[in-house]
Image: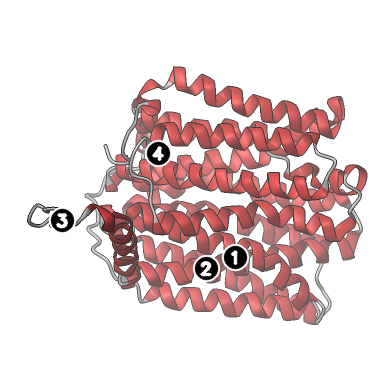
Amino acid sequence: MPPPETIPGQRPASSGLASTEADAVSTLSQLLGQRPFMRLWFARLAGTAANQILMVAVGWQMYELTGSAWDLGLIGLYQFVPALLLALPAGQAVDRWHRGRILAACLAVQAVVALALLQASSALWASRELLLGVSLVLGGVRAFQMSAQQALTPLLVPPALLQRAMAFSASAMQAAVIGGPALGGLIYAAGAGAVYASCAVLLALGVMLLLGLRYEHSPPLPEPVTLGTLLAGVHFIRERKVVLGAISLDLFAVLLGGATALLPMFARDILQVGPEGLGLLRAAPAVGALATSVVLSRWPLRRRVGRTLLGAVALFGLCMVVFGLSTSFWLSLLALAVSGAADMVSVVVRQTMVQLETPDAMRGRVGAVNSLFIGASNQLGEFESGATAALLGPVGSVVVGGLGTVLVALLWRRLFPSLARRDGLGA
C-alpha cells in the first residue's frame, strides 16, 4: 500500500506529539535567550530568597527578644500598613520612571536593612523597636517592588512569550519560597548575624543584575500628580470587566479559602504531626505550585482560559474542603499540594491576562491595585480564618471557606460572563 499523501508543508499526523514537544522546547529556548528577562529572573530569585530568609530571622529574633506572639503579629501588621498606604503612589512612580532602577533601589534598601540588622546583632543592641522599625521600611519598599516587578516583565519579552515568562518567573519565586525559610533556619544556627550577612550578599547580587538591565524606556510626558492620576489604575480596572473579574476573583478566593494561619492548629490538634509535619504542610502548596509553573512554562494554556481560571479557583476551594475534613496527614498534604497547583494556574492566567489587557503606560498603576488586592486578601484572609475558627473551630472555618470559594467561582461565571467566555489570553 502506498504511503498516505501529505499536503506540502504539512507534517504527517503521526508526528503531532513530537512536533508539539519540539515547539515547546524551541519556545522555551527562545525565552532563555531573552537576556534582559533572564537578568530580571535571577535578580528576582536572589531578592525573593533573601526576603524569605530575612523574615525568618526577624521573626525568630523578635521571639527570642520578647517571647511575645503579639509582637510576632505586629511584624506582619507593620509591613502591611505602609504597603497599603503607598500602593497607589508606587504605581504612579513605576509608570513614570525606569522600572529596572526602581526595582534595584528596592533591593538596595533591603540590603541596607540587612546590614543594619547585622551590625545591631553583632553589637548586641538589637531591640523590639528596631525590628518593628525595619518592618515598616520593608513594607514600604514592598509596595514599589511588587508594582515594578509586575510592570517590568512585559517590556522584556515579546507578547507570544509572556505566559511562559510569567510561569517561568513563578517557578523561581516558588523555589525561593520553599527553599528560603529552610535555608534561613539552617544559617540561623550560626547566629542572626550570619543570616543577615547572607541576605545582604544575595540582595547585592540582585542589585548588580538589575543595574545592568537594558530595555527601551520612553519617559512619559510630565503631568501633575493629582487624585485622578493616582486613581487611574482603579478607574481602568473598573471599566474593563475581564480585568476586574480576574483580580476580584483572586481576592475573594484567597480571602475565603486560605488556611495558612490555621496550619499550626491542624498539625498539632487534628493531624498530630508536630513541628516537622507543620513544615511539610506549609511547603506542600508551594511544591504543587512549583511543579505546575514548570509545566505551564513548557506547555502554556492557549484555549478556554476563562473557564480554566474559574475551574482552577473552584478546584482550589474543593481542595480546602478536603483538607478541612481530612484526618490523614498524607491526604492533607496531597490536598494542599493540589491547591497550590490550582492556585498557580489561576495566578499565571490572571497575571498574563491583566498584563496583555493593560497598556504599558498604565501597567504600574494597574499592578499597584493588583498588588493591593493580593496583600489585602492574604492579610485579611488570615484574619478571616482566625475569626471564623473562633466561632466554628478550625475544621468548620476551613470547610466553610472552601465552599465559599467554590460559590464565588460559580457566582463570578454569572457576574462576569465576558471572563467566563474568554478563549485566549490576549484581547
Nearer the observer, disc 4 or disc 1? 1
- Provide the residue designation for mark 4: 230
Q: Which sits earlier in the primary sequence, circle 1 or circle 3?
A: 3
Amino acid under disc 4: Leu
Question: How crowded is the residue under tag 1: few (<14 C-alpha within 10 Å), some, or many (20+)?
Answer: many
Marks 1/2 in contact by CB < 8 Å: the verdict is: yes
Nearer the observer, disc 4 or disc 3? 3
Q: Which sits earlier in the primary sequence, circle 1 or circle 2?
A: 2
Q: Residue at x 61, y 53 (%)?
A: 288
> Image quarter for residue 186?
bottom right
- Provide the residue designation for mark 1: 176
Q: Quadrant of the C terminus?
A: top left
- Provide the residue designation for mark 3: 1
Disc 2 secondary structure class: helix
Question: How crowded is the residue under tag 4: few (<14 C-alpha within 10 Å), some, or many (20+)?
Answer: some
Amino acid under disc 2: Leu
Amino acid under disc 3: Met
Disc 3 secondary structure class: loop
> Image quarter for residue 24?
bottom left
- Provide the residue designation for mark 2: 45
Nearer the observer, disc 1 or disc 3? 3
